[in-house]
Amino acid sequence: MASLGLNLDEQKAVDRFRKDVVEPSMTKLVILDFWAEWCGPCKALAPVLEKVAAEYADKGVVLAKLNVDEEGFIASQFRVQSIPTVYAMFQGQPVADLTNARSESQLKQMLDQLLEKLPVEGGEAQAAQELAPLIAMGEDVLASGDGERAVGIFAQLAEMAPDHPEVQSGLIRALIAAGHVDEARAALEALPPELRADPALAQAASQLELAASAPQDDGELAALRTAAAKDPADMEAQFAFAQAAFAAGQRDDAAATLLAMIGAEPDWNEGAAKAKLLQIFEAVGLEDPWVAATRRKLSLLLFG
């Protein structure tokens, strides 16, 4: 909208319009409703517009209302002859006249047609973009070993996006890393079944199961290590130490013990050592470089 040659009030009106309508329309589909207090049909239409805009918010639709008595200059720029007049705005331009869509079904049909054609950013997509760097920050803190700080980050994210699987997975894994295993278990069990079934929660569930084998203290882990070293042929002792070592954060020792078991007795306890190693891979994350390196060792052992 041109701004040259405008008086102060007109310039202020243009600035308000840019802020309230034009700027949001750069990424959203704006329903622009021209109305007035004295307009009965406007008041009848308003609940329909508000309801549909709320239902379509996640699809990138927002509602902007413009009182023609207060914003007469803007209304004149759009050549509004009668009210209610309703336009769909995208990237600063009117893309459709929605005035004749007086029912929910009519308005939704027209919006659906516009959304199919226009590159409108939905609320869910925008939220995902905003969350991504915050999740990455939480994962970096968790990878650094600061479980308590990671819990704080993911707890805040969980308040923002309680149904986001990566956020819930991060929170559970952070609780485990911080030693709050019971809280982690409660957090997992509190999730709805459809969220627990998400692949992102598989890593957290695996870590939680493995954490159950954590030794009570360094003395218990040392005793398990001694028992395993004393008799390498004792598969039960090897397996117990491997589980405790991983739960205590000593994944290299855990993997080395399990690989040795697979090399010595691959079929022991129906392949329990291989199954435990694969569970560890899932818990750490299949894209982790340590997992990739250890998987190569397993492949050489099985197929080399």
Image (cartoon, grey):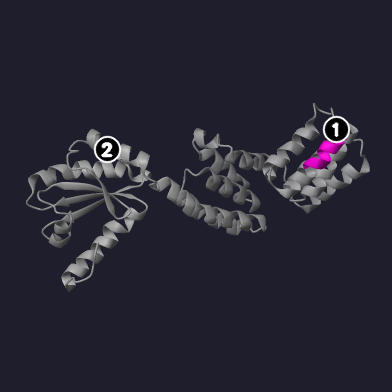
Q: Which residue is mark 1?
A: 303
Q: Which residue is mark 2?
A: 110
The percent position of residue 288, horizontal first and vertical second, equals 70, 48
Please state, as top left, top right, bottom left or bottom right, where the N terminus lies in the image: bottom left
Picture layout, residue 189 above or below residue 36: above
As drawn, is 37 to the left or to the right of 29?
A: left
The reply to whether residue 216 is in sight is no
The percent position of residue 219, horizontal first and vertical second, equals 80, 52
Q: CA distance from mark 1 to mark 2?
A: 60 Å
Q: State the mark number for residue 17.
A: none
The kind of residue on which mark 1 rests is: Phe
Label 1 residue SS:
helix
Which region of the structure is painted magenta? 295-304
Q: Earlier in the sequence, mark 1 or mark 2?
A: 2
- Give the camera-side residue of 291 and 176: 291
As drawn, is 131 to the left or to the right of 249?
A: left
Q: What is the total number of numbered labels drawn onto the structure image?
A: 2
The kind of residue on which mark 2 rests is: Met
The percent position of residue 149, horizontal first and vertical second, equals 59, 59
| Viewer-nearest of discs 1 and 2 | 2
For image coordinates 16% across by 72% down, the residue present is: 7
For image coordinates 17% across by 39% down, the residue present is: 100
Label 2 residue SS:
helix
The percent position of residue 53, horizontal first and vertical second, equals 28, 44
As drawn, is 93 to the left or to the right of 268?
A: left
Picture layout, residue 32 above or below residue 115: below
